[in-house]
Image: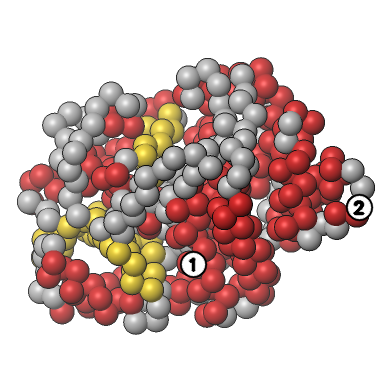
Amino acid sequence: MIDFSFQNPTRIHFGRNAMDKLPLELERYSKRVLLVYGGGSIKRNGVYDDVMNKLKQAQAQVWELAGVQPNPRLSLVREGIAICRKEAIGLVLAVGGGSAIDTAKAIVNGACYDGDVWELYEGKGNNETALPLGVVLTIPAAGSEMSRSSVITREEDLCKRGRNAYTNFPTFSILNPEYTFTLPPYQTACGIVDIMAHMMERYFTMVENVELTDRLIEGALVTVVNNAPIVMAKPDDYDARAEITWAGALAHNTLLDTGRIGDWASHKLEHELSALYDIAHGAGLAIMFPAWMKYVLPRGGAKKLAQFAIRVLGVPESLGSTEAVAAEGICRLEAFYHSLGLATTLTEVGIDESRIPEMAARAVGMAGGRLGGFVPLSPEMAEEVYRLAL
């Protein structure tokens, strides 16, 4: 286990009555609120009304910024920053999933930065302060409700960049599992894959003697795997939704990073897919993670992959060699993704090999020439992973 420092400042309000805490949070921070959300789903399912009623109860002044898209766009971020500066906004409230939250994170940081907000994502600038950020979660997936991460896409060149910063942590997040009942099956499935991927990126490490965090990750993964078929079959099962909602927050809140170095190659490879082809992030991860596993298995990854197969997916150790156990684990993971209705190959989603060299070069270039901490990938190796995904 390596040295670490850990702090997560996000205050969580969880449960059926969690929204009742919103007026109290406004009293703590500000009643000049910018509400950030996506399309019409929160208006159809009643979440918008719940939020607006609480804002009205608190006598808040509200400005609205709608239109957040999956793979959130830089142009809307800039629009939000302009509103914050013009109207002296004191609190940004994101209502939705990772795209709404990541947009809001970029806004609260950019509003307190003198340069262009994209400089923060390119690593050319930094800010020490940000506006307070609140979250009302409706899609368990990205874990952005309790993380220091944010990912934004620049439209003109489809460049997708992530930023990890302490100022990205939400000030508070409201998690009511009932708000996830109306999610379409596809969105639920993509969220489940994303949650699992956040844990798996941390799980596959070359750091030894990390048993505690191994067991924490394994337990959380088993919980998601066990509850996934329940929510797919019965979307309004509160208990199963609650397990997945809380797992999503814990998956990416940095607790599972402690004492270890994760990989993150699969995420970076997928970011190129969703940037160029606008595929849902979770759907892309269901394709890229098994391909990455197949690539690293014979290159030093068999032992950890076999442990994952045994402890998370129930592969019997008696099946055979370490490599055989690991391979069966990959097969079971793909079967699990298929059971959620998701593809596990690029061909299934209509993506061919024409842009593989471009995606590999961009993904590895962003990482400084070597991508991943488990089996570091060169551009040529990244191309091989993409081809395994075909």
- Residue 88 in sight here: yes
Figure quadrant of residue 5: top left
The answer to whether any part of residue 335 appears in the image is: no
Q: Mark 2 belongs to which amino acid? A: Leu
Image coordinates of residue 374 in percent, x first then y, are: 62, 33
Q: Amino acid at mark 1?
A: Thr
- Residue drawn at x 14%, y 48% is 84
Q: Residue at x 61, y 18 (%)?
A: 379
Is residue 15 left or right of 127 when viewed as pictured? right
Q: Position of residue 381 (x, y in %)?
A: 67, 22
Tag 1's secondary structure? helix
Of 6 and 283, nearer the camera is: 6
In the displayed structure image, the side of residue 69 where residue 348 appears, left or right? right
Q: Is residue 49 left or right of residue 309?
A: left
Locate the C terminus by quadrant.
Answer: top right
Counting residues from the start of the chain, the first of labels 2 and 1 encountered is 1
Q: Which mark is residue 245?
A: 1
Q: Residue at x 56, y 26 (%)?
A: 371
Q: Disc 2 versus disc 1: distance between alpha carbons?
A: 34 Å
Please give the label number shown on residue 319.
2
Circle 2: is it few (<14), some (14-19), or many (20+) Cα within 10 Å?
few
Task: Residue 231: give x, y in percent of width and height.
Answer: 61, 72
Name the residue rendered at 71%, 24% in the picture. 384
